[in-house]
Amino acid sequence: MVTKLSHASIFVTDQQKAYDFYVTTLGFKVNTDVTMENGFRWLTITPPEQPDLEIAILAPLHGGMHYNTEVVNAFKVLLENEALGAGVLYTPDCRATYEELKARGVKFKGEPKEQFYGIEAIITDGCGNWFSMTQPKEM
Amino acid sequence: MAYAADIYERMVSAKVYIDKNFDSNIDLAGISRQACLSPYHFHRLFTTIYRKTPHQYLTWKRLEKARLLLEKEGISVTEVCNSVGFESLSSFSLLFKRESGYAPQYYRNIAYLKKKLAKEQPKRFIPHCYIETFKLG
């Protein structure tokens, strides 16, 4: 029986830039941050109120992961075109969070919109990914 | 529930005020002044928008900063307590334990050991599938 998601991966163009976005700006917590001898950096973060989900921030374009050139190029195309929707971020108030993050320089693909499931804005991490930032409709 | 745009601007400016001044002796009256609202009105709106009372949010910010400082070396638990805005070590310890599950000194010891172990044996922290996929072995 599978009961939880314990680890997930987000592929990014630049790990340090991703650190700044997820940790410094969004307030995610660092779980593990260690660099191995071959240069591979194992950086995992957890959402502020979800300590048992570790998200590995992986940089396929930069050393240590042993992908072949073809795979690296495929990642490059996907990330540089922001083709990967990385998930849904929960917020208790989409409009307030949008105002705050926008003032801090975070890029959005448009303003918050009412959807049938709640209020949503599309947020980008600046490292190749976008998320739906959603305030779910109260039942 | 949607509010007028200026309400969001006011609430965000008050939240940012807490984010920047949580280590000082700030109170509800001072915070609500940032939003140009009465303390009662501000408290109600803040709690609706952020799902935490202003006091709960302020305490959470202080404890988060304390957690980061405890993970560093060279600063005592008392100094951590004072530098994040708590006046009483006992109430800090109690709140920290309630939030994290550990007393501050115990949390610090665990963080130190984890950091040491991660440095010495990084593979212990990486699920084997990642080690296999990225040929880290």
Image (spheres, grey):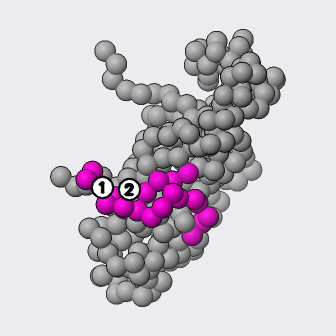
At mark 2, the secondary structure is strand
- Quadrant of the image occupied by residue A103: bottom right
Q: Is residue B59 left or right of residue A16?
A: left
| Residue assigned mark 2 | A120
Image coordinates of residue B120 in percent, x first then y, are 74, 23
What's the residue at 70%, 48% (across, down)?
A17
Structural distance between the alpha carbons of marks 1 and 2: 7 Å
Which residue extends farthest left? A139
Query: Element type at marker 1?
Result: strand
Image position, residue B21 (x, y; %): 57, 73
Bounds of the magenta segment: A103-124
Structural crowding at the residue carrying mark 1, measured as other residues with C-alpha within 10 Å and reported as few (<14), some (14–19) or many (≥20): few
Q: Amino acid at mark 1?
A: Gln
Chain of the residue on which disc 2 is drawn: A
**Magenta residue check for B31:** no
Disc 1: which residue: A115
Query: Magenta span has A109?
Result: yes
Residue occupying the point 70% across, 53% down:
B75
Q: Along the line of sight, which residue is nearer the eye, B49 or A76?
A: A76
> In this rendering, would A16 be left or right of A3?
right
Image check: A100 left or right of B38? Answer: right
Which mark sits nearer the N-terminus, 1 or 2? 1
Q: Is residue B106 left or right of residue A71?
A: left
In which quadrant of the rendered image does the N terminus of chain B lie?
A: bottom left
Contact check, label 1 and label 2, Cβ < 8 Å: yes
> Which residue is nearer to you in this view: A98 or B118?
A98
Q: Residue at x 56, y 51 (%)?
A: A124
